[in-house]
Structure formats: C-alpha cells, structure tokens
Amino acid sequence: MEKVKKRYERPIITKHYSGLMNKYGSRNISSPKSEIDGVLVKELVEKYDSPLFVMSEKKIRENQRNAYRIFKNRYPNVQFAWSYKTNYLDAVCSIFHQENSWAEVVSEFEYNKARKLGVKGSNIIFNGPYKSKPALLKAIKEEARIHIDHFDELYDLIELSETNGQKAKVAIRVNMDVGVYPKWDRFGFNYENGEAWQAIRRILSSKNLHLIGLHTHIGTYIMSAEAYRVAASKLAALAKSIRQEYNILLEYIDMGGGFASHNTLIGQYLPAEEVIPSLEQFADAIASGLFELPYKGEELPMLILETGRILVDDAGSLITTVIANKRLSDGRRAVIVDAGVNLLFTSFWYKHKITPAQENGFHTEDTTIYGPLCMNIDVIREGILLPPLKRGEQLVIDYTGAYNNSQWMQFISMRPNVVMIMEDGSVELIRKAETLEYVSEREIIPAKLKK
Ligand SMILES: *Cc1c(COP(=O)(O)O)cnc(C)c1O
C-alpha cells in the first residue's frame, strides 16, 4: 500500500468535558462512504462535478414496493399518489408512476407537470389552498379528483360546474385534533366544530358536485402512529354519517402523507431510527381506524396515501467537496464545502447523516460545516464529529431526497447536476446544472438601461 504522509495540523487547546466524546475517546464511528449504489463518489464527481445530487432508482422502487406491501397486507384496497412537491424531478415522478402511483399535486403548476408526464386527470389528486378558476375548470373537465380546501373554493366549484354543465368529482380536506400540536387547522374544514359536516351537506345539495371521498393530511414528519388512528377514525365517522343520512358510499378515504422519515431533527437527541414509528405501525394505526366503518368488505372505501418524504428521503444523497479548513476565533474547527443551504433547504430542520467519502483516519473533532454562500445563515451543520479533511475531498450527505430538489433555489450560486443511479448500475443525468444563460434567460433590460 502506498504510504501517505501525515498532514500537519496546527495544535490547539480544546477544553474537554466529561461525559462527552473528546479527542481521546471519540472515533470516526462510520466507515467512509466511497460509493453510492456501487458507483464511486470520486468518479461521479469527476464526470458530473461537485456539488452533485444523486438519486437511487433502486431505493425509490424498493421503498414504494415495501410501503405498498405493508399497507396492502393490512387493508384490502390501497392506492398511493406521489406527492409532487416532495420531489418533482420528472425522472423521480416517472418511477413512482411506473410503480402505479397516481399524482398528488398542490398547484396548477404541479397539475400541469403531472399531465405532461402522461398522468390522466382521473389519476390526479388536486390538493392545495389555491386553485385558480381556470385550473379548477380544467380539472373538472379532465375528471381530476378535486380536494376542496375552503368554502370560497366550494362556491367556485358550484358556479363553474353549473355554468359549464359539467359534473365535478370532489372530496373535502378535513382538519382535526389528532393530539399533535400545534394543530394544522389552516387547511380544509374543521371536524370538531362541525364545519366539515356543513361542507359535506352543501356539496350533497348541489347537483353537479359528486362527493367521492374524504381527505386529511394531518401534518408532516409526524412521529405518532396514534395520531393517524385518530384521524382515520374521525374520517370513518364522517363516512358513516354520510351513508346513514344520504345512503352514499364513498369511493375512498385519503389519509394524506406525513410519516416521519429516518432523518434526525435538529434538537432531537436520539437518532430518528430509534424514535420514529415504523411504516408497519403507521399502517396498523390507519387500518384500525378505518375498520371502525361497519361496512362489508367490498363496501370498504379505497385507502389513498399521499406519502412523500419517507419514500424518497433515503433515496437521495448530496455529494459536496471541501473548499477550505478553518479555525473559528474560539478555536473550533470549521470546514467550508461547496454546497450551501440554497441547495440543502432541509439542513434548517435536519441533522443529516454526513460521511467522508474517503479514509480520513480515526480522530474526529467537533466541526461546523459551512456552505459557500456569503451569508451568515449558510450552515450545513452546527457541530458534527468529523476527521480531518483535505481540500478537494468529498463528504456525502445522505437522506436528501425529500424537499431539496423542489425547495432549492438559485441564490448566489446556481443549481448543480442531478444524476440517477439506475438499477443496472449505469448513471443518468436527470437534471442539468444551470448556466448563466439559463438563469438570465427570463430577464429583460429596459432599453433605457442599455448603453
Ligand atoms: C406535502 C403533502 C404531502 C406529502 O407529505 P410528506 O410529509 O412528504 O409525506 C401529502 N399530502 C399533502 C396534501 C401535502 O401537502
């Protein structure tokens, strides 16, 4: 083996605290992550540059199949709908659609994106608090499932369906107390105060609105399975009343998304794996709530799940390169990397799993990871034990598949390449790095300002 000369690091005095890991007691717990799905990180960076988002086709399919199996074992009729905002890269959505997922969209933009990908209207769930009238009309005509958020939207739908002589397929979003606080009560109609029931009566008294389901999305990164049991049981109670008073059987009950992924929250002491319920527990809870419906097997409504983050978070990684090492004024160690919070929006919430891509020795030190932006908020991680890293070496940030490729922004620096490692080990570019031309394409300089 090639002998590598030890690098000199300026000595510093560090105060050690008993009970915490220190220079002598700590070691680099995880071994380096030099490849992703069998492809070398070094090679990926050579070919596609750094920073680089990497998605795993295999992992997405595995996650989706696993989730379907878990729910299908517990409830007879299950349909997933991919939550576009969680990651709406076309290649990612296409995998979910190949795995039989419908599309769950929360805006006209996302609706059009799903249609462009070939999803038919009746396989689109149209959620969200803002749907313009033209968007609603298109959704009505294309027989999308429109989930009504508030009374003003309900009135728009009554008007649009009547003036155009079209029937609209609708459900309502219901918000409720499920024991998780703060309550999410800004979307949909409230259960406890009777608003949801009032909306249902209004829909059922309109000849052009066809009530096909009930929907709830109780929140995101929910760590309580019991909350889902309560939610399912409340929707089941509504469905039961609808049958008793109107003799109508609903086509489906949609339980939304929100299952916590295995990313650890900032401020959460134990790793997520140890405190998050399993998908089996979430599924048990939902099934037990739904089975409160006193229906015969074939009468049971379809269970729709709009699961987002837990299906894709661990299918994405961000490779980033060390630009510089630094000591802060109090002696703490810092590294600057080439990926900033404009790319990794979730670093405001999560302590991502971050692993060097090469052997860096066993001694670790508490390190702050800064991004390249000239902004004080650009902190990828406050305090993580890392071995010494050389300039040009890589870190792999795991669990970045959810909400980063939709919430990232072009700010100070542009968005980089995204590749997908395919099941056969080949690598495909699925979104090209932005260029100055691309970014300024939409800008117009008034004539007066041109010299
Ligand atoms: C965001 C969202 C989802 C997906 O939530 P996750 O927390 O990513 O599972 C599902 N349904 C609705 C209505 C949403 O807004």
Image (cartoon, rainbow, N blue to C red):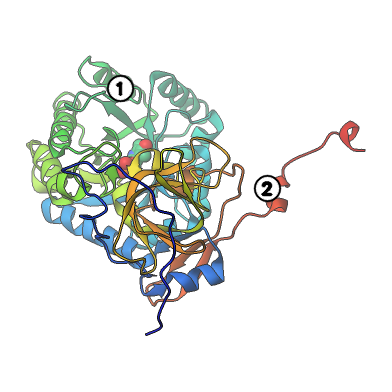
Q: Is residue 320 above or below residue 275?
A: below
| Amino acid type assigned to the residue bearing label 2 in the image | Val
Query: Where's the C terminus, which quadrant?
Result: top right
Is residue 225 shown left or right of residue 1? left
Q: Nearer the viewer, residue 6 or 231?
A: 6
Q: In x, y percent, where is residue 252?
A: 24, 41
Point 34% across, 66% down: residue: 33
Q: Nearer the viewer, residue 202 or 110?
A: 110
Which residue extends farthest right? Answer: 451
The image quadrant in which ligand 1 is located: top left
Give the residue number, with chain letter if any, for mark 2. Answer: 439
**Front: mark 2 or 1:** 2
Residue 425 location (% of width, % of height): 40, 76
Question: Quadrant of the rendered structure where residue 243 is?
Answer: top left
Q: Residue at x 60, y 50 (%)?
A: 414
Q: Secondary structure at mark 2?
A: helix
User: What's the residue type where badge 1 is placed?
Assistant: Asp
Q: Residue furthest bottom?
A: 1
Identify the residue at the far top of this view. 193
Q: Front-most of 327 and 350?
A: 327
Whether residue 96 is visible, yes or no, is: no
Front one among 339 and 263? 339
Q: Position of residue 248 (x, y in %)?
A: 21, 32
Where 190 falls versus 405 (above or below)?
above
Please indicate whether residue 451 sits to the left or right of residue 195 in the image: right
Q: CA distance from mark 2 to mark 1?
A: 37 Å
Q: Is mark 2 within 8 Å of ligand 1?
A: no
- The first of marks 2 and 1 along the sequence is 1
Mark 1 — residue? 185
